[in-house]
Image (cartoon, grey):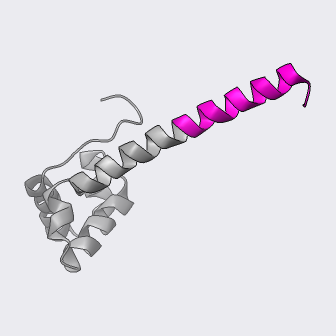
């Protein structure tokens, strides 16, 4: 694994690591053994305690299809506005208004 690249853990792996921490009572040692920052263990534990089983199942929550479509449309509209602004600036320069 390259430096700066995040590893993904399955929910089962996360639970096993948290159980190991519970057994050993040494979070720093467990984190080091698994190549994790200790803060991540604390975050997993806190989220588990608050019923964030959805987080433990897998990484990121899926976006709604409609939200993704709106984001794509928004990006297209931004590109269109940028293109028109550039055209307008070029026309103003040709006419000597800028």
Residue 87 is situated, as x and y percent measured from the top left of the image, at: 68, 27
Residue 65 is situated, as x and y percent measured from the top left of the image, at: 22, 52
Tell me the residue at 25%/48% (across/down).
Answer: 33
Q: Quadrant of the N terminus?
A: top left
Q: Is residue 39 left or right of residue 95?
A: left
Tell me the residue at 37%/43% (across/down).
Answer: 72
Q: Is residue 8 left or right of residue 81?
A: left
Q: Is residue 82 left or right of residue 39?
A: right
In the rendered view, would you say 84 is above or below 56? above
Secondary structure mostly seen in the magenta stretch: helix
Tell me the residue at 37%/53% (across/down).
Answer: 37
User: Which of the two residues, 40 or 70, is positioned nearer the viewer here?
Assistant: 70
Does the image show residue 60? no
State the residue lying farthest toward the front. Answer: 95
Residue 68 is situated, as x and y percent measured from the top left of the image, at: 30, 49
Q: Quadrant of the C terminus?
A: top right
Within the magenta stretch, is there residue 84? yes
How many marks do you count on the picture? 0
Q: Quadrant of residue 7?
A: top left
Q: Is residue 88 left or right of residue 77?
A: right
In the rendered view, would you say 98 is above or below 40? above
Within the magenta stretch, is there residue 26? no
- Segment colored magenta: 80-98
């Amino acid at each position: 694994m390259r430096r700066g690249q995040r590893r993904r853990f399955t929910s089962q792996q996360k639970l096993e690591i948290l159980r190991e921490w519970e057994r050993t009572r040494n979070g720093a040692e467990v984190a080091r053994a698994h190549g994790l920052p200790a803060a991540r263990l604390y975050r997993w534990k806190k989220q588990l305690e608050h019923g964030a089983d959805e987080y433990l199942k897998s990484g990121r929550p899926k976006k709604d299809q409609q939200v993704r479509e709106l984001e794509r449309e928004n990006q297209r509209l931004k590109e269109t506005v940028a293109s028109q602004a550039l055209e307008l600036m070029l026309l103003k320069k040709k006419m000597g208004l800028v």
